[in-house]
Image (cartoon, helix red, strand yellow):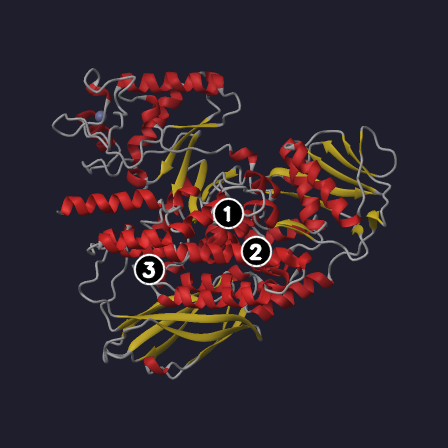
Amino acid sequence: MNPISELHERMHIMQSVAALIALLLLASLATNAIAAGQLPALRRYRDLKVYSTSTPDKNQPERIVAQTQFVNEGPIPLRINARLDARQTLSFKGAQFGGEIAPGQSKVWQWSFIPPAELQQRQIINGSVSINGKRERDLYISVQGNDPGSLPAKGIEKIFERAQAVATYAPRTQESIEAEMAYRNAHQPKPKLTLAGQGKTEYSIVMEAEPASKEEAIGDLQRVIKLQSGVDLPIRATADGPAIILRKSDLGAAAKGLHDAYRLYTEEKNVIIESPSTNGLRNGVYGLLTDHLGAHWFQPNELGEEITIPKDRTVRFPELNEVRGSRWTSSSGASWGRALLWDRRNRAMIENGRMTFGHSWSGYINQNNYPFDKYPEYYARDRQGNIRRKGTDSNFCSTHPEVIEIVAKQLNTYFKNERDAIVSSIDPNDYAPMCLCDRCLALDKQYGQLNEDGKNVADRLLHFSKEIHDRLNPQFQDRYLGILVYAFQIELPKSAKPHPHHAGLICDMVWVFDHSRPWNDPTSSMNRHFYELVKGWGKLLPQFGYYDYYGHWTFPGPWGMVHKMREDLPAFRDLGGTFLMLEAQANFATQGLNHYVLAQLVWDLDADVDIAMEKFFQEYYGPVTKPMRDYWLTTERLYALERPGANNPPRVAMRPECWTELQRCLTLATLTAANLPTDQKRFADRVKTTSDGFEYAQRYFKYQNRYGEYARDSGRPIDHMAAIAYLREQRAFFEAMRKQYEGDTSYWPPLTPPFLSLEVETAIKGHEAEMAKAK
Ligand SMILES: [Zn+2]
């Protein structure tokens, strides 16, 4: 399908979305004095989208005609002036565009170039975009040459023409971001109250109600005030003078649609945190600390904490009256369980992650409780009646009446024991083959699903969910039954409808969909498909979750996902999404910006991502801001300019510039941090953790690319002798890294998850075995 024409259909949704966002911003203004809505609307990143595609000129096929499209999804007209610089290697003389785009409309800029017959290296064309007279965006368009016939097409869109415009990246300019920060700072409300100063305070903490995780939240509150002012804030049973008061209270209409919400307000000299829930009270404490008192937990553990100390050691803040909460009904996984305290401090664990579920069928029926030989008819079978297996396990047959009774009975027991559980999984085993018995195929047909390979089973599983829900005891019928929108059940159902307590969780599988760009970017066929799936399921599902990977599970190196998540997460909410389950593996050293921005968006979907990133750069890196900003933003750019394709990390990592450009930033950062005074040593350590992670990833990738996973995937012969020599040479390095980052973990943020360590001994044994086999 032509992506540009498809956009027109999408504009309708976008227009109503833009109106909704404008309304929400207005609503938030009432409670939040410095909400983003007060700023010039054109600054909002999501208002302007820029996409490029290209086709060879019909009359002159060596000429490539590119179409760059500007889409205005904001509430005001945008006057766009864009420029692309000449690029000699593409015989491109440069181009200019000017035009006004009404809200909800788009305009196409056509330009062309003549690439050489054999364009060896990907070319990046640079440019800029002005919006309403101000230079707001940098512009990068990547052009890639014809693919060799021998290139396997797996996971990519092959390029048959001379060259193709494969990706567009239009990040906000540094000047634009700094201007907005200056604006925000100038419009900060003036401090009115003094909490503590010059070693003294009138204040105490009064817990009329206790927050969840009381020790850590109240401990952090006391510790931050102490660090900032030298004062110990006492905890009292009743107020004796002004106090920070935690109180259980309903928040009424102001908190409608918000989860784990709180109201934070000042009343005369008191600071009051109110919430109906203990989670809300905890969030209120962290809201006070993070949003108003300059305490940040940019990364996990001691090194990740940055607390601003006022010069006069006096803690002041303005009059407050705000209601805040997350728009997700549940969220978990912002550090994939590796740093739960960090999740909570960043208000990124919503409703205790109650909507969490995964593969489960073998938990109900497996060869231990129902042996294959005694109960063959309980299991998924092929057309000959043989049990279909994956490994040692098998899915069950979801239409067998006894199977349905067994599963329902177990769920009734589960919900009886787990009183707080809101959901239980009835999701099949991971990619395990589905049943092809007559009864199952007949059910598929009843819904109009005529495929007989069991690879499109959404209808069958929605039917199964209803069968189970009908058998839940009445007191459990308000609970949800969860099935992933994934693997053989990701395509839309033909005609089955979910029952009102069915929950779906769509998975943006890295190995199937395109993580080089947001999935609302229509220039990637994989993502156009994913967008349609989200849209379709969003209309059907009463509870619709999103699963994505913002810390990679097999690649510990640089992986820029911010440009993607900042579009995907709001787009998911707009299309009917209600909750998140995230797999952000703890590669904090080289992917930690993903984790930080993710946490901000879990809590506040309307957070300004550029401002959040700039805070991270300036406050987390202090005197080393510039080279570390370059490091993280270069990572984003490298990924955003990659061609459409699934599983992007190895493709980016195989470009030498991925390592050399980033290495240059880190070398400069290390030099800048080399002679800092002792009280600023933390900035040098923060550079060191990313440098360590980078070096670790480089050596890890080199191994996988020459002798491991990527070499095997591409069918290259492996030199086992050389592999063993490499591993022996690297052993000391990997052991030292593990010792530092996995030993005492209270200071350093996690480098990678432990399972991404290279197990040197095991790997050597594997290569030795391969060599023995070859003899
Ligand atoms: Zn069956």
Q: Is residue 491 among what the camera can see?
A: no
User: Mark 3 near ligand 1 (CB under 8 Å)?
Assistant: no
User: Height in image: 673 above or below 247?
Assistant: below
Quick one: label 3, few (<14), some, or many (20+) residues within 10 Å?
A: some
The residue at which mark 1 appears reads as 740
Which tag is nearer the camera, tag 2 or tag 1?
Answer: 1
Residue 724 percent location from the top left of the image: 28, 51
The amino acid pointed to by label 2 is Arg
The amino acid pointed to by label 1 is Gln
Q: Nearer the viewer, residue 285 or 170?
A: 285
Residue 65 percent location from the top left of the image: 32, 75
Q: What's the residue at 47%, 25% (across, down)? A: 479
The residue at which mark 2 appears reads as 686
- Asked where in the image residue 487 lies, by quadrant, the reply is top left
- For the residue labelled by badge 1, is the local secondary structure a helix, a strand or a loop? helix
The residue at which mark 3 appears reads as 651
* Earlier-in-chain disc, 2 versus 3: 3
Residue 178 percent location from the top left of the image: 63, 67
| Res. 516 mark | none
Which tag is nearer the camera, tag 2 or tag 3?
Answer: 2
Q: Quadrant of the N terminus?
A: bottom left
